[in-house]
Image: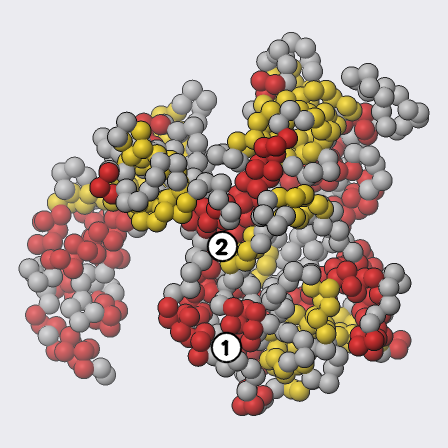
């Protein structure tokens, strides 16, 4: 028994009976030398009271001493911030549930209004511009339903702000008429932040700065801040990335303790690290990545096994050997969640000493790995697999284009790589086998065009080009899928709690909308109320040669949910796997590192706890979305900047999305998307049909639909908002005309000859 616990129990006779009745008293004794009433007990007493309770009287009821007063107030304050209780204007403690209050997070809108997204689920509540004046985007609030707005939405009144989450804001600083203020780069923060002259520092009007908020906004006051960092000119090189990092609160500087731990790591694999590992340095494993890749976390090897199939070895960097739970590197890796890849810059999850050095499977050096060693049949089934820690020696760093040129016969490998060809050819044959198994399984293969921004020597965009995926890309993709499936099966079979990569099927509402849309084209998804991935795959195969294939695929893709991380294995709908997890990228994804630890625990006869996995899954899903949002912002800014020199030019394109305020058009060849606002569609009142992805003119009957081929003119490219505006020149071909069988060359609606 600890001395602290002995002291607490010895003095129990001094604790009032009401405090001893706390069901969680023993837990509080374990945690604190002077235990306070637990949160649960406080809530229990307030519930039993059946009415608001005076805060001072409540403290006296619990016999809170003068010495305990500050600590007790802190506990009540923490409970207020968490939305467990609140103080009314009479300084009475109240339970929010009894007041019909709703706890949620504020979602701001650039036009000044906003919404509250309830934490317990349910429909969003509308916040008027007046209510939004009290808060900023992201703040946590308690609200009361105050009625309905003219559109029938529940309207909320803010009762209490639980948490102001914005401590620092990045934006443009302006000085006008002697008044300094910041316009936030995040357009969801609609309010200006006042910056008094004494807090402006060296900032000049028009510059990008970071401001620390000193006074949060209120019903009768603006937010006030001070400049803490001057980033420079809005159009300076790399400024778009600097803004995105701060706007999305991406950690981009490693704390000193992380750098210190990274510096202490060895520069190479040590002899002592080989204990308990299988030595497979003789296997000619190779890495195959893009030309610009710097962190290599996977290496592969394949050999044919005659009629019985193939042996596939996938070696993954053993990051978990160097990054231990709860050390500085681990905590920072969790905070970041994943690496973020911007054009010309990477924000790594782990310091470069690991990501590009000790954990990168560089050629011709020994590296520690976790290996998935598989036997795959000639029909593509994984007959058996084995996981083990190993030491490897990558025999070459190859690129996708290089490998594909050899396999396709366009080029012959250099002399030093000639010996690798039999293994690469075996990989290619295995890939063909896995591809057939994928089709049989019914995995969905949505084709998409990725783009790459090419810069000139001055850092300006030279061109935007499509990324051509060849079969070498797909070879590695299938190898990684196989290893990931084995990892999920291994963890599941051994009942080791883990983070799965789950992807659920479409909701009932989205499925109904999709079926309605497809019916207009004479198509049916099949599968009844719960379609399988096979049904999606079969329909994609059926429509692949149709001229409106792109339109139909887009609508099908939008009917599916977003994949997330969760300890609840619900399968992966898109890949048609009953269980799936991420094992192959622990350098750049924290969930993969967690999976490695789970596999090692099983191999060592241990079991990691499930506690906290759900929260880790939510966090990593959030950091993944955060990275996507940040990279999208940077791409949008760069593309807008690129289009500034093309105002007035005309292009052909395809309607890629239809909204209530207009339609977005994706321009051919340059891969830029811009908006044709509803006011540019013609002299008519246009109404948005969400189910049909269409705008319909009330008077003229004109229809503009997803998939229409149009000609547009570039009107504006506003780098302040990263928005590109088009005007509609003509409709070249409608989605219906594209879908109709072509008998002979005709004329388009506009009269121009179709090509």
* Pair 2/1: label in front: 1
- Residue at 58% from the left image edge and 47% from the top image edge: 458
Q: Give the residue pinned by disc 2.
A: 623
Asked whether residue 437 appears in the rendered view, the answer is no
Badge count: 2
Q: Residue at x 49, y 60 (%)?
A: 337
| Residue 416 spot, x, y in % from top left | 80, 77
Left or right: residue 360 compared with residue 745: left
- Closer to the camera, 382 or 752? 752
**In the image, residue 389 lies at what x, y percent?**
61, 81
Give the crowd class for mark 1: few <14, some 14-19, many >=20 residues within 10 Å: some
Front-most of 533 and 129?
Answer: 129
Residue 25 in the image: above or below residue 554? below
> Mark 2, residues whose alpha carbon is within 10 Å: few (<14), some, or many (≥20)?
many
**Residue farthest to the front?**
457
Picture quarter containing residue 221? Answer: top left
> For this view, does 153 lie left or right of residue 500?
left
Figure quadrant of residue 704: top right
Residue occupied by mark 1: 322
Give the answer, above or below, for where 147 lies relative to 306. Answer: above
Identify the element where label 1 is drawn.
loop
């Amino acid at each position: 028994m600890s001395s602290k616990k002995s002291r607490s129990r010895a003095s129990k006779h001094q604790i009032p009976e009401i405090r001893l009745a706390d069901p969680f008293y023993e837990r509080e004794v374990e945690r604190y030398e002077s235990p306070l009433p637990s949160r649960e007990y406080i809530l229990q007493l307030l519930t039993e009271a059946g009415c608001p309770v005076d805060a001072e009287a409540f403290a006296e009821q619990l016999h809170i001493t003068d010495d305990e007063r500050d600590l007790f107030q802190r506990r009540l304050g923490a409970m207020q911030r968490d939305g467990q209780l609140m103080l009314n204007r009479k300084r009475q403690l109240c339970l929010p549930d009894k007041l019909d209050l709703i706890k949620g997070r504020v979602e701001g809108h650039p036009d000044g209004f906003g919404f509250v997204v309830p934490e317990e689920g349910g429909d969003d509540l509308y916040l008027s511009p007046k209510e939004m004046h009290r808060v900023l985007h992201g703040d946590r609030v308690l609200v009361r339903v105050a009625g309905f707005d003219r559109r029938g939405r529940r309207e909320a009144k803010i009762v209490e702000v639980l948490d102001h989450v914005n401590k620092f804001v990045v934006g443009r600083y302006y000085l006008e008429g002697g008044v300094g203020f910041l316009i936030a780069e995040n357009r969801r923060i609609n309010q200006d932040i006042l910056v008094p002259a004494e807090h402006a520092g060296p900032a000049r009007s028009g510059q990008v700065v970071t401001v620390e908020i000193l006074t949060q906004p209120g019903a009768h006051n603006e937010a006030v801040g001070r400049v803490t960092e001057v980033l420079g000119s809005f159009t300076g090189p790399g400024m778009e990335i600097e803004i995105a990092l701060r706007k999305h609160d991406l950690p981009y500087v490693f704390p000193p303790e992380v750098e210190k731990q990274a510096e202490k790591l060895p520069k190479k694999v040590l002899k002592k690290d080989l204990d308990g590992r299988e030595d497979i340095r003789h296997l000619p494993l190779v890495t195959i990545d893009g030309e610009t890749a710097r962190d290599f976390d996977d290496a592969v090897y394949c050999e044919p096994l005659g009629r019985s199939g193939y042996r596939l070895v996938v070696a993954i960097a053993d990051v978990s050997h160097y990054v231990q739970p709860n050390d500085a590197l681990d905590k920072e890796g969790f905070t970041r969640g994943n690496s973020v890849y911007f054009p010309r810059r990477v924000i790594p999850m782990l310091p470069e000493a690991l990501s590009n050095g000790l954990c990168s499977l560089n050629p011709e050096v020994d590296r520690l790995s976790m290996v998935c060693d598989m036997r795959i049949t000639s029909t593509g089934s994984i007959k058996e697999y084995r996981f083990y820690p190993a030491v490897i020696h990558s025999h070459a760093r190859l690129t996708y284009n290089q490998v594909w040129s050899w396999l396709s016969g366009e080029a012959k490998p250099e002399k030093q790589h000639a010996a690798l060809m039999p293994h690469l050819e075996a990989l290619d044959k295995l890939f063909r086998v896995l591809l057939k198994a994928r089709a049989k399984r019914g995995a969905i293969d949505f084709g998409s065009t990725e783009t790459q921004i090419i810069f000139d020597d001055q850092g300006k965009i030279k061109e935007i080009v499509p990324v051509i995926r060849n079969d070498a890309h797909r070879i590695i993709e299938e190898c990684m899928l196989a290893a990931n499936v084995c990892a999920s099966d291994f963890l599941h079979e051994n009942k080791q709690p883990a983070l799965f990569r789950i992807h659920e099927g479409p909701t009932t509402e989205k499925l109904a909308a999709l079926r309605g849309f497809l019916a207009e084209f004479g198509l049916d998804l099949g599968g009844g109320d719960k379609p399988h991935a096979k049904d999606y795959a079969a329909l994609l195969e059926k429509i692949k040669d149709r001229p409106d294939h792109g339109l139909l695929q887009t609508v099908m893709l939008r009917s599916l949910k977003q994949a997330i991380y969760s300890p609840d294995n619900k399968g992966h709908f898109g890949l048609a796997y009953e269980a799936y997890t991420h094992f192959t990228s622990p350098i750049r994804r924290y969930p993969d590192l967690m999976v490695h630890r789970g596999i090692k625990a099983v191999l060592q006869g241990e079991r990691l706890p499930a506690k906290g996995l759900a929260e880790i899954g939510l966090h990593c899903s959030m950091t993944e979305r955060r990275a996507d949002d940040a990279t999208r912002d940077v791409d949008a800014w760069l593309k807008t900047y690129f289009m500034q020199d093309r105002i007035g030019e005309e292009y052909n394109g395809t309607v890629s999305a239809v909204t209530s305020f207009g339609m977005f058009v994706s321009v051919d060849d340059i891969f830029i998307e811009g908006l044709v606002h509803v006011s540019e569609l013609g002299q008519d009142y246009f109404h948005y049909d969400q189910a049909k992805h269409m705008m319909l003119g009330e008077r003229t009957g004109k229809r503009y639909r997803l998939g229409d081929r149009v000609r547009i003119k570039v009107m504006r490219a506003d780098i302040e908002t990263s928005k590109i505006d088009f005007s509609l020149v003509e409709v070249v071909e409608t989605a219906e005309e594209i879908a109709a069988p072509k008998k002979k060359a005709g004329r388009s609606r506009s009269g121009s000859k179709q090509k």
